[in-house]
Amino acid sequence: SPAANGAQVLHLSVALCVLNDTYREAQRLGVKVEGVAVEADGSFTDEWCSTGIEYFVTLDSRAPAEVLNRLGAAVDEVAEIPRAVRAGAPVKRRV
């Protein structure tokens, strides 16, 4: 879904990272991909704490399903923004 508020830009950053890394990993693995679409969404509590992010990738490719599944797993492993969100990190304001 489109980013309706600033917090949802986090979802957009996950989607863009996965999109970029899908093309990169497809090239690295020799998987021909004609197009990629990524949807990412999640929710927030009333205090703006993320309840998690899920993403879904649609691939335009003639590659067999098992090859596309390996590609998806490779992307999920290396995509930097999802990895950073999963690991968690403190965010502090500097003054």
Image (cartoon, rainbow, N blue to C red):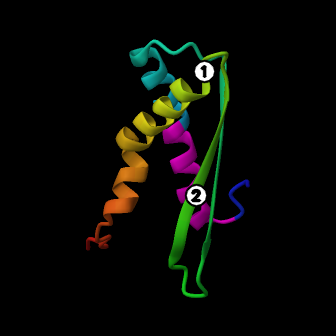
Q: Quadrant of residue 51?
A: bottom right
Looking at the image, is mark 2 or mark 1 nearer the viewer? 1
Q: Is residue 6 magenta?
A: yes
Q: Secondary structure at mark 2?
A: strand
- Does residue 36 sit above or below 55 in this rendering? above
Residue topped by disc 1: 64
Is the C terminus in the top left, top right, bottom left or bottom right quadrant?
A: bottom left
Q: Earlier in the sequence, mark 2 or mark 1?
A: 2
Magenta portion: prevailing SS class: helix
Residue at image position (34%, 55%) is: 84
Q: Position of residue 43 (x, y in %)?
A: 62, 72
Question: Is 1 on the left or on the right of 68, as rendered?
Answer: right
Tell me the magenta residue range: 5-18
Residue at image position (45%, 12%) is: 30
Residue topped by disc 2: 54
Give the Cα distance between marks 2 and 1.
24 Å
Q: Is residue 56 magenta?
A: no
Nearer to the camera, 47 or 34: 34
Q: Quadrant of residue 1?
A: bottom right
Q: Position of residue 68 (x, y in %)?
A: 55, 28
Bin the neighbour count of mark 2 within 10 Å (Cα to Cα): few under 14, some 14-19, many 20 and up.
few
Residue at image position (52%, 49%) is: 13
Q: Position of residue 62 (x, y in %)?
A: 67, 15
Q: Position of residue 37 (x, y in %)?
A: 67, 35
Question: Is 79 on the left or on the right of 13, as rendered?
Answer: left
Looking at the rendered structure, the kind of residue marked 1 is Pro
Q: Secondary structure at mark 1?
A: loop
Residue at image position (61%, 62%) is: 8
Question: Is 55 on the left or on the right of 80, as rendered?
Answer: right
Q: Is there a contact, CB below 8 Å, between mark 2 and mark 1? A: no
